[in-house]
Image (spheres, helix red, strand yellow):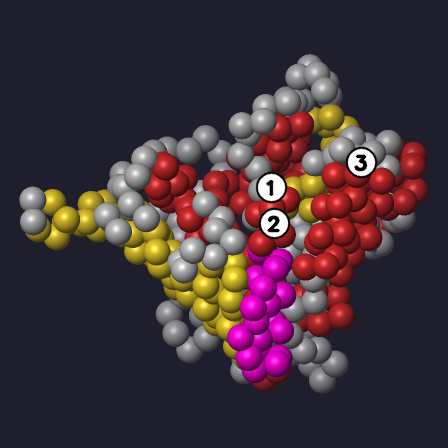
């Protein structure tokens, strides 16, 4: 691949994330051109194409792949479609940025990454929170040995009122494959595991609840198809999941996500290391804790300014990787597989009421 190549990007799914993120961010990259957008809702695809200046609109992604021959495809549709769409794009010879969760099950994710490997294509996932300023700062502290050995961590994203698209695909098990656990769980896992260098999960115990959604409570503001609770609105996914994951080397991770809860909004990842600890806030803080001259100290990190948002960096890194930079930080197959493996095990543990040994 040559670094002067212009990458032809096609986007499947003209929803909220494509409109706000994928199309504008790919359009900002000097080496990519968004050539087409596809959505079963063609009126929406046309409106977004007009707004962003994308030349071609499709209702059928297979036709788009055949006619446009894109070399990058973005999959940003309801979760259940990620596997068939990403697989078709890889088989058509494109590299793929697939929205999270990459797949609904570990087996599906394994099959997708096998397809990517068989076609020598890059398949990566939109878990972009690792590129926020606090995560990047915490990673620098970790790489430089501040924490010593991280033996325990807790990673939490609990919203006060944040159920997306009530009654839309987001809250429909058949289309979403799950609720808070799949939707924000993979981001929450990546925040901790990225710093911990992705240890291998061994044992998982989890529980799941749906206490707000079924009563039409805790509704948030994301999702194109939001409508008011009605007799027809369907909510058959989880809205809270907690778990404990023990890794191969005995390291433990506690995990809590909720779309809605009677508790203040909490977005934090806490690290417990032999030499230092940290409290990584969601957006703007990394507080460090250690001993100095026999005394307990707390250090506040002054976060370096970042160029662009976390998604800008995810996409820029993806393009750099495609241009041959092996050091460009992308969500690797092994990392994306671990997200789904843990989510899968939490679901099984919750349903079967037992610890899952991987
Ligand atoms: N990385 C992130 O932080 C982040 C944030 C939001 C959403 N997402 C993910 O992005 C994906 C899309 O979410 P959204 O918020 O944009 O949803 P959305 O409901 O706004 O948009 C989804 C779009 O997909 C279209 N679609 C459905 N079936 C289709 C098909 N067969 N072919 C073509 N288009 C089809 C719908 O018509 C809709 O326009 C989801 O997987 C979601 O989890 C990721």
Q: Quadrant of the C terminus?
A: bottom right
Residue 91 is situated, as x and y percent measured from the top left of the image, at 85, 40
Q: Are marks 2 and 1 in contact (CB under 8 Å)?
A: yes
First in residue order: circle 2 vs circle 3? 3
- CA gap between label 2 and label 1 equals 6 Å
Toward the viewer: 116 or 57? 116
**Could you tell me which residue is drawn at 62 percent across and 58 percent down?**
340
As drawn, 17 above or below 68? below
First in residue order: circle 3 vs circle 1? 3
Q: Which mark is residue 332?
A: 1
**Could you tell me which residue is drawn at 42 percent across and 48 percent down?**
196
Q: Which mark is residue 336?
A: 2
Local SS, label 1: loop
Q: Which residue is mark 3?
A: 119
SS assignment for the magenta stretch, majority: helix
As drawn, 296 above or below 8? below
Q: Which residues are magenta?
A: 339-358
- CA gap between label 2 and label 3 equals 18 Å
């Amino acid at each position: 691949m040559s670094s002067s190549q212009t990458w032809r990007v096609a986007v499947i799914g003209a929803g909220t994330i494509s409109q706000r993120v994928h199309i504008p961010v790919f359009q900002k990259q000097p080496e990519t051109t968004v050539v087409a957008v596809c959505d079963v809702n063609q009126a929406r695809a046309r409106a977004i194409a007009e707004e962003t200046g994308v030349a071609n609109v499709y209702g059928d992604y297979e036709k788009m792949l055949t006619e446009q021959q894109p070399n990058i495809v973005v999959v940003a549709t309801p979760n259940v479609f990620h596997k068939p769409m990403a697989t078709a794009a890889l088989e058509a010879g494109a590299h793929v940025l697939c929205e999270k969760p990459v797949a609904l099950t570990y087996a599906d994710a394994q099959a997708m990454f096998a397809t990517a490997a068989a076609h020598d294509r890059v398949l990566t996932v939109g878990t972009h929170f690792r590129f926020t300023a606090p995560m990047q700062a915490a990673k620098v502290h970790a790489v430089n040995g501040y924490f010593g050995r991280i033996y325990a961590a807790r990673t939490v994203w609990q919203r006060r009122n944040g159920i997306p698209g009530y009654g839309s695909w987001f809250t429909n098990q058949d289309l979403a494959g799950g609720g808070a656990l799949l939707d924000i769980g993979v981001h929450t896992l990546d925040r901790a595991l990225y710093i911990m260098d992705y240890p291998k999960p061994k044992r998982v115990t989890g529980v799941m609840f749906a206490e707000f959604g079924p009563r039409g409570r805790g509704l948030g503001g994301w999702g194109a198809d939001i409508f008011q609770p009605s007799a027809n609105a369907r909510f058959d996914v989880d809205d809270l999941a907690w778990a404990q994951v023990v890794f191969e080397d005995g390291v433990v991770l506690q995990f809590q996500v909720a779309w809605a809860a009677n508790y203040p909004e909490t977005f934090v990842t806490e690290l417990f290391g032999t030499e230092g600890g940290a409290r990584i806030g969601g957006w703007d803080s990394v507080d460090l804790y250690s001993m100095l001259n026999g005394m307990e100290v707390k250090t506040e990190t002054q976060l370096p300014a970042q160029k662009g948002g976390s998604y800008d960096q995810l996409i820029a890194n993806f393009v750099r990787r495609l241009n041959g930079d092996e050091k460009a930080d992308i969500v690797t197959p092994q990392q994306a597989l671990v997200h789904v493996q843990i989510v899968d095990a939490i679901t099984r543990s919750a349903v079967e009421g037992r610890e899952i040994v991987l």
